[in-house]
Amino acid sequence: MPTSIKIENLSKQYRLGTIGTGTLSHDLKRWWTTSIRGKEDPYLKIGETNILASNQQINKSTNQHINKSTNQQINKSTNQQSNYIWALRDINLEIEQGDVVGIIGKNGAGKSTLLKILSRVTKPTTGSIKYNGRIASLLEVGTGFHPEMTGRENIYMNGAIMGMTRYEITSKLDEIIAFAGVERYIDTPVKRYSSGMTVRLGFSIAAHLEPDILVVDEVLAVGDAEFQKKAIGKMQDVSKGGGRTVLFVSHNMAAVKNLCNTGILLENGIIRKIGEVDEVINVYNTEQTRDIKTYFINDVSNTSPIYVAEFKIITDIVTGKEFGFEAKIFTETEISTAFAVGVRMPDSTPIMHIYSGHVGEVFKLKKGLNFLKGKIDHLSLGAGFYDINIWLGDGATVYDYHKNVLNIIVKEGAIREFGPVSTKNGYPVITDAKWNLL
Amino acid sequence: MNFDHHIKPKTSLFEINIRELWEYRDLIYMYVKRDIVTFYKQTIMGPLWFVIQPILTTVMFMFVFGNLAGLSTDGIPQPLFYFSGIILWNYFADCLTRNSKIFIENQGVFGKVYFPRLVVPISITISNLVRFFIQFGIFVIIYLYYFFQKGGNIDPNLYLLLFPLLVLLAAGLSLGFGIVFSSLTTKYRDLTFLLQFAVQLWMYITPVIYPLNSIPADKQWLIALNPMTSVVETFKYAAIGQGVFSWWHLAYSFVFMIILLIFGVVIFNKVEKGFMDTV
């Protein structure tokens, strides 16, 4: 497949705060004090000079060493010193025709900036993008919709804004209306539409644009599940049937997984990972999850005489491997209790219960601090994300209960000597069995 | 590998894509249509508003300037004199004011989708033209009334053929000034207020409420420095036969318009590329 988009050394720098001072009077005053009276700029903030200077140095540098230090500079959220941020930094990419590329990353990773540059809404600071054919960008649905105009008039308006000719729109009008499912309302002003209808209509126009490259920012989030499915189907058709390139930004990993074949993970303006969409999503999810294995409980409101003070996982968390945990339990009196660890899916579906009562274990605790250890020889959870709840009590009373104490990641592993265990089928529980061919 | 599009950080000052603008001609059409259609939706009188405003202004001018102040109208019937000036001036002033706010008012659209931004000022200039011609129809009615009435002192002449040029001049000047100001207002918001004020005063250095003749001959050139002067004055001269006609004044306005447009398009073109980061 030929290359459809080629991005070379693309960077985009934003300046924090306002540009200039926004008013003529401020600029005149600045000019008066700095140029005529030779004093300091009245609007320059303390410390700004240094930062400007250091930034110029970065701009000038081309060698590798200093570029590495820029990588630290570009951490947008933590570096509060600099007045400049790199929304994108040295992006190099080649996208083949017909690829469906999912761009993922945290808020502020540079996803939207990349799409804005591609849509030519803003221009890059350095570097370039070369591409073939027409780009239709859907950074927002229904750009240019006028509430007073009817659906039909708005189709023409919006289509024209996106570069269609009136003839093209007329030839596709019926399809657009049918896809959006607004046949009955097409001659009603858009201000009477529900928000869902507006989104459907807006998306429908863009989808029928027949661009060579379709750029879609998180716009489907507003539609209902049925429409989202339809829209993703339409985008799939666009890429498979027409050999067109689709760039899709979303926080909905299921949608990205469903639609895209290639994934790009952006982080603080640089490409963190690029490759098979599943792989990239995994990397993203792994980093999203807190990788902490100890939970300290410091609940002042808990006046119970017996409680869990600390819970931690003491082994690596790998499918099929040993899984051990330890709880620190405090009690004011001697007491007998059972202990349980509940494992839930991220959507809080219960998936595994490790309960001492199930195996008849009740612990006689001594007064003061007690340490309780538990272990499973072969962890039967497939690779993925799980939440942990802990529970302390005997059959009749709950002494202590904490939801979501830890969010764990189970890493890919093997049961017996085979493996790694595939999690592609989506079953969270992986278990060994004894097999016999009779 | 060849690519047919190239996005790069800096483009030449004079890289103006006229062909692209032509490809978006349907968008110009849609913008004009939207402007006109939405203007009178949910109004009782609809396009009548286009007409009421200049008529009321004319009545007001007749009372204040004609009767109270007793300013000369060069022997032209007062309604005809004021109305002709007002519709030409209003067209110019409305276009100018609306064009000067393009970037600020269209931030939403401009931030989401690319199209040649010049589409917007051009469509505003055209849609206001529709309004102008509706008002011009009323002018023709008033004109014919005085023409057939004896002693109306109406003397139309061949210079009427210049009428399309005069409309072109008004359109070009308002477009030119408008895009220059809109480019500047992305950085300096206060220019919008300045402009509102300036447009009000500007009318008084344009022969709308007085004929150029009433200015001493050696000072007339001062008023003629205003490129709109020859537009208003030539129109009155051609239709009514009273006023000052000068090829020099006209040529001056024309050259002024051309230079202004070139300057405007260049600066607009520069601003449109980076304005999303500065507005």
Image (cartoon, coloured by chain):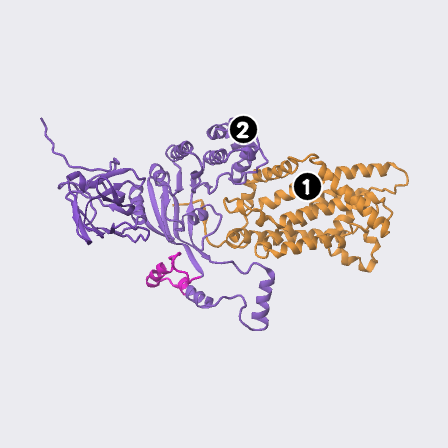
Chain colours: A purple, B orange
Visible in this render: residue A14? yes
Q: Position of residue A175 (x, y in %)?
A: 48, 28
Q: Is residue A65 magenta?
A: yes
Drawn side of residue A429 relative to residue B238, left or right: left
| x 53%, y 26%: residue | A184
Q: Identify the chain of the residue marked 2, using the numbered disc in the image.
A: A
Q: Which of A97 and A311 is in front in this view?
A: A311
The quarter holding residue A73 reads bottom left
| x 82%, y 41%: residue | B156
Residue stretch rendered in magenta on the structure: A57-82
Q: Considering only vertical position in the picture, is A346 above or below B101?
A: above
| Residue assigned mark 2 | A185
Q: Mark 2: which amino acid?
A: Tyr
Q: Nearer the viewer, residue B42 or B69?
A: B42
Visible in this render: residue B73? no
Q: Position of residue A398 (x, y in %)?
A: 26, 43
Q: Position of residue B58 (x, y in %)?
A: 79, 44
Q: How many marks on residues?
A: 2
| Residue assigned mark 1 | B129
Q: Which mark is residue B241?
A: none
* Label 2 crowd bin: few (<14), some (14–19), many (20+), radius 10 Å: some
Give the secondary structure at mark 1: helix
* Label 1 crowd bin: few (<14), some (14–19), many (20+), radius 10 Å: some
Q: Is residue A431 magenta?
A: no
Q: Identify the chain of the residue marked 1, using the numbered disc in the image.
A: B
Q: Mark 1: which amino acid?
A: Leu
The quarter holding residue A1 reads top left
Q: Distance between the residues labelled 2 and 1?
A: 32 Å
